[in-house]
Amino acid sequence: MTRRLPPLNALRAFEAAARCGNFTRAAQELFVTQGAVSRHIATLEEWLGKKLFERGRHGIRLTPAGQNYFASMRVALDHIEHGTRQLLQSPDDSLLRIKLPPTFAIRWLIPRLSRFHARHPKIDVQITTSHKPTDFDRDDVDLSIHSEPHPPTGPGYRLLFRETLVPVCAPGLLQRDPPLKKPADLARHALLCSLNRPQDWPTWLAAAGVRGVDGNRGLKFENAGMAYQAAAEQLGVMVAVLPFVQDDLASGRLVAPFLLRVRTEGGYFMAWPANRPVPQRVRDFEAWIASEAESAQT
């Protein structure tokens, strides 16, 4: 069936003019004259039978019909741009691109990554760290790892491990005043946490039945990795995600002053585009990291 599309050059001129809010800037972006842009817009308006711009002494303004059409055109052209960029920059089968939070990368993945490389020496790994949610239609990544407060539904996800909260501190902090023998003693210590995880302390304190301790006070850091370092330097007590401090607890660099561990509904998940064929490099990484996560928990 033949597609019924307006002139494509006219569409480009309209999208640029609507985005720039000015025929002159649109012309500069498209490397044509202002008159050419104006003619393209007039052609498109005639083809559609709709007025897209209000012209006035002080410039142009989208009509309601133009605003709706611009929203559709912007999405369509974004998809075309993304698909083109992916085609031009498409990695070969040996490059695995991963996006994940910096704390997960530093405290969990990187110490184990040599084992993946030993098992799959032909796969090169490219790591990008970010707390922003992954949009596989726009981000040039093969998979992401992220935390979710509740298990996501649908295909394209795999649980790596649940989140278990435990307060930790440097051993030297236990030798100093004020004492830290029971959860209520936290009232006299600095609480350390990540700005990205504001509910961790309130969740643990509620489970411990502690009253009179404000879980939102204390020292807050841009990411949890900085808070873990602050705990090691005896600045206070950090509420940690257990898998991220298991090595520190085993080595004695950090200690858990209380027995209570609080398991939340959240967890860390691996995700990949569910609407595309899954490359073998992603399957290989999924099998490896699932095995590592299971081993770490047992």
Image (cartoon, rainbow, N blue to C red):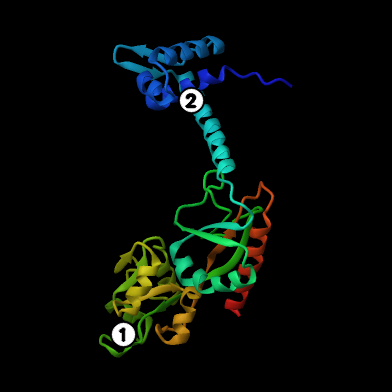
Dot label at residue 141? none
**Residue 99 coordinates in the image, percent (x, y):** 51, 57
Q: Residues within 10 Å of mark 1 (few under 14, many from 20)?
A: many
Vertical placement of residue 195 versus 92, above or below: below
| Label 2 residue SS | helix
Residue appearing at x 40%, y 20% in the figure: 27
* For marks 1 and 2 on the same chain, the one whose residue lies earlier in the sequence: 2
Residue 276 seen in this snapshot: yes
Q: Give the alpha-carbon distance from disc 1 to disc 2, as whole Å.
A: 60 Å
**Residue 43 coordinates in the image, percent (x, y):** 51, 11
Q: Which residue is mark 1?
A: 173
Q: Is residue 175 left or right of residue 148?
A: left
Q: Is residue 281 left or right of residue 214?
A: right
| Label 1 residue SS | helix
Vertical placement of residue 261 versus 265, above or below: below
Q: Are marks 1 and 2 in contact (CB under 8 Å)?
A: no
Q: Which residue is mark 2?
A: 70
Q: Nearer the viewer, mark 1 or mark 2?
A: 2
